Amino acid sequence: MVAWAADFSVRNLDILGYLLPGFAVLVIWACLGTFSLFEVLRSRLQSRKWQAYAPALALVILLLPVFQAARNYKSNDHSQNYYVYEYGQAVLDQVPSGSVIVIGEDNTLTPLWYLTLVEHYRSDVLPVAWNAVENLDSLKNLKFQRPNLSIPARLTKPRWVEKFAQLNPRIPLFVQYADLPSDIEKNLVPQQYLLRYSNGENAQELKSQNQKQDIFLEQLFSRLEKKSDFDLGTEEHYGNLFFNWGVYFDRHGSPEQSFLNFNRALQIDQTNDRYYTALGRGFLKSGRIKEAEKFFLAAMELNPFKQDNYEYLRQCQNQAGGKPTSP
């Protein structure tokens, strides 16, 4: 079971949930081992020769959990970790009253749900799960929450966003970046953490918004760069944030901004193979084969099961005149 969970997802931070049965088994074996040790010591301590050592042995056993607690407390103490809370507030503060935000990432959706539903912070904003737009029961719940909204149904996720905007032209609609068709993505305008759905802005206005977005991302990264107490979840979250903007700028013909944001993602989180692959592709496009190979090899080391990296490495070696690598 533990082996299955480990293979299930190297990157899935929920893996600890899958390992809970394994931890339970480990605790049982630890208790049995401690009991066996105790029985051995008790049989030895029946003789007066060993009775003098009884207090010392008991103290050692009692100090073991204290030692582990003292050793690991600092790294597991998140009582002052407000990154997710502050991030959720920042996302909600950037949108106007009555907005609808379609979110595809749990690390963003969960804090928005908590703030709006539990603390009633910006409760005028409606966070919508990306997967919910294809579920009729979820759509009924949205209609129950906001009776004034016209909720489309039986549409794919991208078409749902488009149809919702058409049916509710006065409702500000925001989405988290996702792989959307070009005819829908052209209506999305960068606005800090999210993309605002618009009925189309001219090229000059879009260029201006992209420039503002570039400044915002630079300032955000400068603030994050000074932090040294990120936990795994926070690293993954902000890494994905910059990675998504790298994809956005790449698709919109801005390779410099794209490469810059991929590099920011990697500086925040060095354990995600996608960031190495994205940077490798950037070097490959620019003809810097040696640099591309290094990043593809690093991505393969982190995730040896992703076939795309092997294909990219073959392209590198073919361009360099070398032999292709077999997976």
Image (spheres, rainbow, N blue to C red):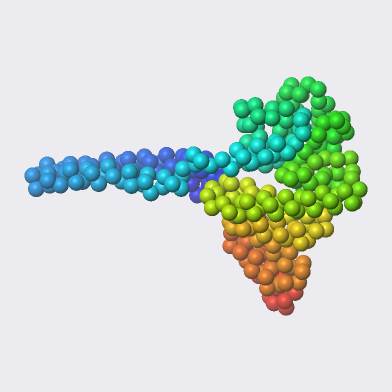
Q: Identify the residue at image location x=43%, y=46%.
A: 74
| Image location of residue 104, percent across then percent down | 70, 41
Picture coordinates of residue 103, whole percent (x, y):
71, 39
How many marks can you see? 0
**Lateral position of residue 189 relative to residue 274, left or right:** right
Q: Position of residue 170 (x, y in %)?
A: 85, 30
Q: Toward the viewer: 176 or 171?
A: 171
* Residue situated furthest left in the rendering: 48
The quadrant where residue 96 appears: top right
> Image height check: is 50 above or below 133?
below
User: Would residue 191 be visible to someone looking at this image?
Assistant: yes
Tell whether 303 sits left or right of 169.
Answer: left
For the C terminus, the quadrant is bottom right
Closer-to-camera residue (134/281):
281
Q: Is residue 312 left or right of residue 270?
A: right
Q: In x, y percent, where is residue 69?
A: 37, 44
Closer to the camera, 106 or 140?
Answer: 106
Kindly identify the residue that appears in the image at 91 percent across and 48 percent down. 202
Residue at the location (54% across, 44% down)?
Answer: 15
- Based on the displayed image, in which of its 4 quarters is residue 264 positioned? bottom right
Q: Which residue, as the protein is rendered here, is positioned at the far bottom?
A: 321
Please indicate whether residue 108 sits to the left or right of residue 14 in the image. right
Residue 137 visible to an observer of this rendering: no
Say if 276 sits above or below 64 in the image: below
Residue drawn at 66 percent across, 34 percent down: 112
Of residue 296 and residue 146, the one placed in the foreground of this image is 146
| 156 lies above or below 230 | above
